[in-house]
Amino acid sequence: MKERERQLEYLSQNHPCFALYKRPNLARIHLPVCPSCNIICKYCIRSINDNDERPGVAKRILSPKQALDIVHKAVKICDNLRVVGIAGPGDTLATDHAIETFRLVKKDFPNLLLCLSTNGLLLEERAEELAQIGLNTLTVTVNGIYPEIVRQICGGIRYQGRRYLEEEAAQILINKQKEGIQKAALLGLIIKVNIVLIPGINDKHIAEVAEAVKSWGAHMINIIPLIPQYQLKDYDAPGCEQLADARKEAEKHIKVFRHCQHCRADAVGIPGISEYRQELYELLEGDD
Ligand code: SF4
Ligand code: SF4
């Protein structure tokens, strides 16, 4: 078995969000250390609250030091914790907070898997730093590979101090995602691509995205149903059958992850099964 296949097999058994068959009953902790973003996804509402169960939401933003403290507390409460992930609530590479946090966590917990999600705009520029800190798994959201589709999903980007809109923004984002995934793959990272399935925008485009990201070096794809909100509030969420068909189409080109739970940016526990967030943040607040 080739080295890459061996790594994928290992992750499938040890990382609940890279499981290709039955999901292992193992926990992950998301550290909400990233406050800001450099692109505008038309389906994204970032929010600080305790109620919404969806990505982009956290109870509070943690500093890297507070994030390390919470991992120390989490390993005591959650004995099956295997993965430390950073997935927002903003983009993880738009500031230095995620990389700084991972450096601290790696030092104290060399055996936990480190996992980062990004929109990919700055991935090519920061991939070497990610490899150096020992990142194990990377997720990049790629909602399309043609600017006329991506412009309907992404309203604009901020890149190298300038704002870009419409197709120009979409084209830069696609180019940077491609370069970023190619570089991360060359550096040996295991890469999952998330795609938000949006009926009427990219639903006929899934197989092409799957084929393209596979050729760039990604190892699996995770097709996530749209949560209709913000500028895409009038679009329908895909039904179960549509989601299943999209996964079947993608699977002709690349492995498909099927267990995603649409987690918050501060989720703690086994996805969809256990949640330790309240308990942990109460402990942290007791220390503040
Ligand atoms: Fe929201 Fe993530 Fe898109 Fe930024 S990249 S707008 S945080 S979904
Ligand atoms: Fe895993 Fe999906 Fe939750 Fe991310 S959002 S931690 S991929 S289950």
Image: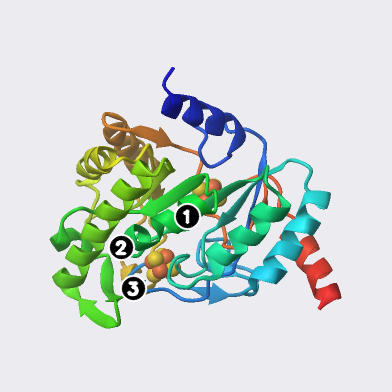
Q: Earlier in the sequence, mark 3 or mark 1?
A: 3
Please give the name of the residue rendered at 68% of the width and 65% of the height, measured from the top-left corner. 67
Regarding mark 1 in the picture, which secondary structure is present there? Answer: helix
Residue type highlighted by circle 2 = Tyr
- The residue that label 3 is drawn on is 40
x, y percent for residue 193 = 37, 47
Q: What element does badge 3 sit on?
A: strand
User: Does residue 136 show up?
Assistant: yes
As rendered, which of 197 and 255 lies closer to the eye? 255
Q: Specify the quadrant of the image occupied by residue 159.
A: bottom left
Q: Is mark 3 within 8 Å of ligand 1?
A: yes
Please name whichever residue, 24 or 92, is drawn nearer the observer in this view of the structure.
Answer: 92
The three-letter code of the residue at mark 3 reads Ile
Up-down relation of residue 266 to residue 256 (above or below): below
Where is the C terminus found, in terms of image quarters?
bottom right
Whether ligand 1 has any atom under 8 Å from the Cβ at mark 1 is answered as no
Q: Badges 1 and 2: C-beta atoms under 8 Å apart? A: no
For marks 1 and 2, give the one nearer the viewer: 1
How far apart in space, not on screen, are marks 3 and 2 (Cα)?
Answer: 17 Å
What residue is rendered at 79% in x and 70% in y?
284
Mark 1–mark 2 distance (CA, rounded to whole Å): 36 Å
| Viewer-nearest of discs 3 and 2 | 3
Which element is circle 2 on?
loop
Please name the residue that numbered disc 1 is placed on.
130
Amino acid type, label 1: Leu
Q: Kindly identify which residue carries mark 2.
A: 235
Q: Is residue 21 left or right of residue 181?
A: right
